[in-house]
Image (cartoon, grey):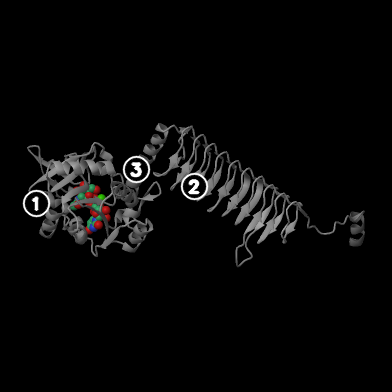
Amino acid sequence: MKTGCIILAGGAGKRMKSERPKVLAEVLCKPMLGWVLDAVKDFGFDGVAVVTGYKSELTDAYVASRGENIITYLQKEQKGTGDAVKCAEEMIRAMDSVCVLNGDAPFIDSDTLRASLAYHIEKNAQVTVITAEIPDPTGYGRIIRTDGEFTAIREQKDCSPEEAKISEVNSGAYWFSAQKLLAMLPRLSTNNAAGEYYLTDCVEMAQKRAAYISANPKIVLGANTRKALYELNTIARNEIISKHMDNGVSFVALDGIVIGADVQIGCDTTVMPNTVILGNTVIGEGCTIGANCHIEDCTIGNNVRFDNVRAYSSVVEENVKVGPFAQLRPGTVLHRGVKIGNFVEIKNSEIGENTAAGHLTYVGDSDVGRGVNFGCGSITANYDGINKYRTKIGDHAFIGSNTNLIAPVEVGDNAATAAGSTVTKNVPENALFVERGTTRVKENWEKNFKRKKK
Ligand code: UD1
Ligand code: CA
């Protein structure tokens, strides 16, 4: 059986007051559409389509950035969810069963999709709606049951006062028989309070319908306003932190801690307050991360200590200490046992085992060996205003305090640079490089200076 998925993402979401499509509004720094696409990817459909509309170029760009095999269809005018599904007719034709999802309900998950498909097949239904009971059903389509039998979905705007009291709602996620969906779509009308083509009208049209009640009511939650979006963030944040606690991660206090949905953290690691960990970050076991760290897309080994660190797209091996007040910019690789101290920035550089840069150092575009010591204030001058060049430093080299390494330049193994030197020539291994002006000490200078002044 071929399964396809159509994600509705064309609406403007006026109440968000945003220049961007609503589905790109973020929950824990990931677009809502991204959460839905993650569940879809995990399910493994034979085909996936996203229906775009408002500012479609932005939605297209996000979908393309994921590098997955997803088709987008443009719905030129937002005439309702039924019309949106029609835009993906080509995809429906190629499938046996079609799942339709709302791009603005981020908490749908692949387990629910699998279980509801099994139910859809078991009930031999033409349409199966995924529903849930929620305490405040305002705004959602209500599940109408006649003598217990599921018969229709009534939108908020079309509800009688009695129907409005129903707490079982439509999640906006459905399974359809592809053939039946193709037959029903042309029969939808705009004869309702919103004047839109409602996809939900397919329920009444179908001869065999089923309602799969999800055990997890949060899958229905969507966001139409910033306040609702904040609530989704809060729910996701608490759930993710609690999952990490279950996995053996410690939190002394949760203040200011935000961990993205895709972050992995090993056991016996402690995350301290005011720490934001995002993207595809993986952190090992026995680490202490924080306070006050911001980490994105990093791979961090075991027993690492980060204190007041910003780190982006970097790899940090085990037993490394970074901070306080240090920044690792993209392309940084710190091998085992490295020590990076206060006010040090590393960018696009590989730093060998047990190398130390304790204070006030900039290392950019460099390949640094093992056991190197960077003295306080030493820097690589990697940019001449037009091009960037690399610096190479051999094992156990000693870079004296306040050394300027003018790239491209190489310092050999076991070589040293004298404090204050500006290194413009390669330093062979075992050599000492000294570059200083002639030292002059003028005796009695102050007295003579004052006499001249008079
Ligand atoms: C819809 C359902 C409602 C359900 C709710 C769950 C209908 C008629 N109603 O209502 O029963 O409880 O979802 O969240 O389907 N979209 C388009 N093109 C359009 C209109 C909408 O692509 O022309 C997209 C939106 O971007 C959104 C999704 O479809 O991602 C749902 O549309 P929305 O307007 O938010 O529907 P709801 O009023 O929430
Ligand atoms: Ca909605």
Residue 332 at least partly seen: yes
To which residue does mark 3 refer?
A: 231
Name the element at disc 3.
helix
Of the two numbered discs 3 and 1 on the same chain, state the one appearing first in sequence.
Answer: 1
Q: Nearer the viewer, mark 3 or mark 2?
A: 2
What residue is rendered at 36% in x and 59% in y? 64
Of the two numbered discs 3 and 2 on the same chain, state the one appearing first in sequence.
Answer: 3
Q: Amino acid at mark 3?
A: Glu
**Residue 168 horizontal/vertical position (percent):** 18, 40
144 vs 171, left or right, is left
Q: Is residue 343 above or below residue 187?
A: above
Mark 3 → mark 2, Cα distance in angstroms: 28 Å
Residue 169 at least partly seen: no
405 vs 276, left or right, is right
Name the one closer to the observer, 366 or 363.
366
Q: Quadrant of the C terminus?
A: bottom right
Mark 3 → mark 1, Cα distance in angstroms: 35 Å
Name the one closer to the observer, 53 or 50.
50
To which residue does mark 1 refer?
A: 205
Neighbor class of circle 1 (other Cα within 10 Å; few <14, some 14-19, many 20+) is some
Q: Amino acid at mark 1?
A: Met
Q: Is mark 3 within 8 Å of ligand 2?
A: no
Name the one closer to the observer, 157 or 367.
367
Disc marking residue 298: 2
Of the two numbered discs 2 and 1 on the same chain, state the one appearing first in sequence.
Answer: 1
Mark 2 → mark 1, Cα distance in angstroms: 51 Å
What residue is rendered at 34% in x and 51% in y? 34
